[in-house]
Image: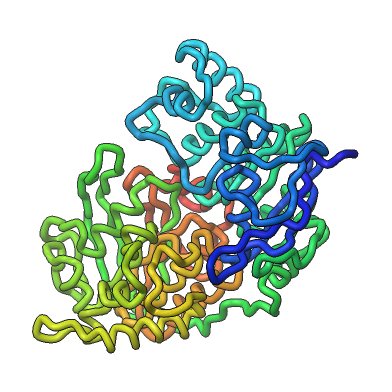
């Protein structure tokens, strides 16, 4: 059978780095083909060349045996390539139909488009109302908008980049049913994910990249997740370990925390209550958009809270800002790396200064100690294996995974008494994720308390002592993770948090 897409000797170099080095692979019609590799392995560059966003320096691509060299995404789409990006490109204030129309070359009238959306959503098991406002949709529903936009253009190859990072287990199963149906109809799927058990469940073949080169292929269902991870990183992986120290006294307490959303499409917090003890990791799960950012903002001091709702070491702190809370030992690392956790155009030294000035003594009497800030940045880079040319590199120049390691390392090395982290390993490869999880475990073992907000259920089950679900701004009663399974957690994330575990 003639391959649908074949890549031969693709090479793409940027100043100082070869992103793809002589990459060759083939994808057959109807095949679900995984593209695996740690952060910086070259996956993003490769799919950008297929989608017309980047031009290779050398090598050849062929689509159904014919030379294929798209000069822009429009040309790739015309050749039958669709792509669902990791970050959704949707306008909250517009309807589903209006958003889909904006992504089409020759969109029909909205009435006709709405009918087609309904037909496609019914055919592929992706229920979606064309007239709903996108700002009111869950993360899973937003992803359906992106997928349906691609399907309306009848793709022969569908590229999916980390498609399950914001989905509940139940939504993942719906997505997989859709992808299997597409595969059965002859549509090929190029699937990028760090969730290796999903790769094993869904994909027919996997190509593994390391440092821009193809280092192997495998049949995922015949290969363990650990073996695939070790092929990706080229070394034996360590499993995060913990000695199991008993939790100490309550260090952070929330009582009836209620705050309106700062934006029209945000989620208000409703009567959130919890107690966090020294030495424990409290895992908070939930589908994106259910109040995770709002909760982190309330805890970090970016959002002020009325008196009596937040106590840290017995002291009321609702009116204190981030710097005062940091000085006391309450630190936070938000989900959004660029623009929130780090200033994109500032160097790593400057970004180290931004949150480390108070606790690391980088400022005195209004003067900034840049030499000490560089030393702090170097310590982060060394301790967390951040791949970067140096401390003068701009944050935006790092790969997503390396920037995440820098952000988490910057907070962990400041010795917090409480650390609140949102999606600490999102989009991070297996080796980096294991290192970050071990750092959080070590922090808790040293007596700190950690709130881990994550949509990665395996991560929550692996390192959290207790679990609570956040749904529509409400937090369930935390329960020991030892008594839960993924199905129960998925139901709690979907809104069943008021039910007893035995009844879930």
- Residue 330 placed where, x, y %? 26, 73
Say above or below: 249 vs 22.
Answer: below
Which residue is rendered at x = 54% and y = 64% of the image? 428
Question: To which quarter of the image does residue 72 belong?
Answer: top right
Q: Is residue 294 above or below residue 351?
A: above
Question: Whole-percent x and y of residue 472?
Answer: 35, 43
Residue 321, can we see it? yes
Question: Which residue appears at 63% of the width and 49% of the height?
Answer: 49
Count numbered badges in the picture.
Answer: 0
- Residue 67 in the figure: left or right of residue 168: right
Q: Looking at the image, can residue 225 be seen?
A: no
Give the colour scheme shown.
rainbow
Most distant residue in the right direction: 1
Along the line of sight, the residue nearer the viewer: 398 or 337 = 398
Q: Is residue 106 left or right of residue 180?
A: left
Q: Residue at x 35, y 62 (%)?
A: 344
Residue 208 picture quarter: bottom right
Quarter of the image containing the N terminus? top right
Residue 135 percent across, percent down from the top left: 36, 34
Drawn side of residue 409 relative to residue 251, left or right = right
Q: Is residue 245 left or right of residue 127?
A: left
> Is 436 located above or below residue 243 in the figure?
above
Q: Nearer the viewer, residue 477 or 159?
A: 159
Q: Position of residue 373 (x, y in %)?
A: 29, 83
């Amino acid at each position: 059978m003639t391959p649908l897409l074949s890549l031969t000797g693709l090479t793409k170099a940027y100043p100082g780095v070869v992103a793809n080095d002589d990459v060759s692979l083939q994808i057959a019609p109807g095949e679900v083909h995984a593209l695996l590799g740690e952060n910086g392995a070259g996956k993003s560059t490769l799919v950008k060349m297929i989608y017309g966003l980047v031009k290779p320096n050398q090598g050849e691509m062929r689509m159904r045996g014919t030379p294929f060299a798209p000069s822009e995404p429009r040309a790739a789409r015309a050749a039958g390539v669709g792509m669902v990006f990791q970050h959704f490109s949707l306008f909250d204030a517009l309807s589903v139909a209006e958003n889909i129309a904006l992504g089409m070359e020759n969109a029909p009238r909205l009435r006709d488009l709405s009918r087609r959306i309904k037909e496609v959503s019914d055919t592929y098991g992706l229920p979606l109302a064309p007239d709903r406002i996108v700002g009111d949709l869950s993360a899973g529903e937003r992803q359906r908008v992106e997928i349906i936009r691609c399907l309306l253009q009848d793709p022969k190859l569908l590229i999916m980049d980390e498609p399950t990072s914001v989905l509940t287990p139940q939504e993942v199963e719906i997505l997989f049913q859709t992808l299997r149906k597409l595969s059965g109809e002859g549509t090929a799927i190029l699937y990028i994910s760090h969730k290796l058990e999903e790769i094993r469940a869904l994909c027919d073949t996997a190509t593994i990249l390391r440092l821009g080169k193809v280092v192997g292929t495998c049949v995922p269902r015949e290969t363990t997740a650990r073996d695939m991870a070790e092929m990706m990183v080229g070394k034996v992986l360590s499993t995060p370990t913990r000695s199991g120290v008993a939790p100490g006294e309550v260090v952070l307490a929330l009582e009836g925390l209620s705050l309106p959303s700062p934006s029209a499409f945000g989620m208000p917090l409703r009567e959130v209550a919890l107690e966090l003890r020294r030495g424990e990791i409290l895992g908070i799960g939930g589908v994106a958009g259910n109040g995770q950012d709002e909760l982190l903002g309330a805890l970090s001091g970016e959002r002020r809270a009325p008196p009596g709702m937040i106590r840290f070491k017995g002291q009321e702190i609702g009116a204190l800002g981030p710097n005062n809370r940091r000085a006391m030992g309450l630190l936070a690392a938000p989900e959004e790396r660029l623009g929130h956790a780090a200033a994109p155009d500032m160097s790593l030294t400057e970004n180290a200064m931004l949150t480390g000035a108070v606790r690391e003594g980088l400022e005195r009497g209004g003067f900034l100690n840049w030499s000490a800030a560089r030393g702090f940045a170097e310590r982060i880079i060394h301790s967390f294996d951040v791949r970067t040319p140096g401390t003068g590199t701009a944050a935006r120049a790092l790969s997503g995974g390396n920037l995440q390691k820098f952000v988490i390392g910057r907070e962990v090395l400041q010795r917090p008494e409480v650390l609140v982290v949102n999606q600490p390993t999102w989009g991070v490869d297996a080796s980096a994720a294991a290192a970050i999880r071990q750092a959080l475990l070590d922090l808790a073992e040293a007596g700190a308390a950690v709130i881990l907000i994550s949509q990665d259920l395996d991560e929550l089950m692996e390192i959290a002592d207790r679990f609570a679900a956040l749904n529509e701004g409400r937090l369930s009663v935390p329960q020991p993770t030892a008594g839960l399974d993924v199905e129960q957690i998925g139901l709690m994330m979907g809104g069943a948090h008021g039910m007893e575990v035995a009844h879930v």
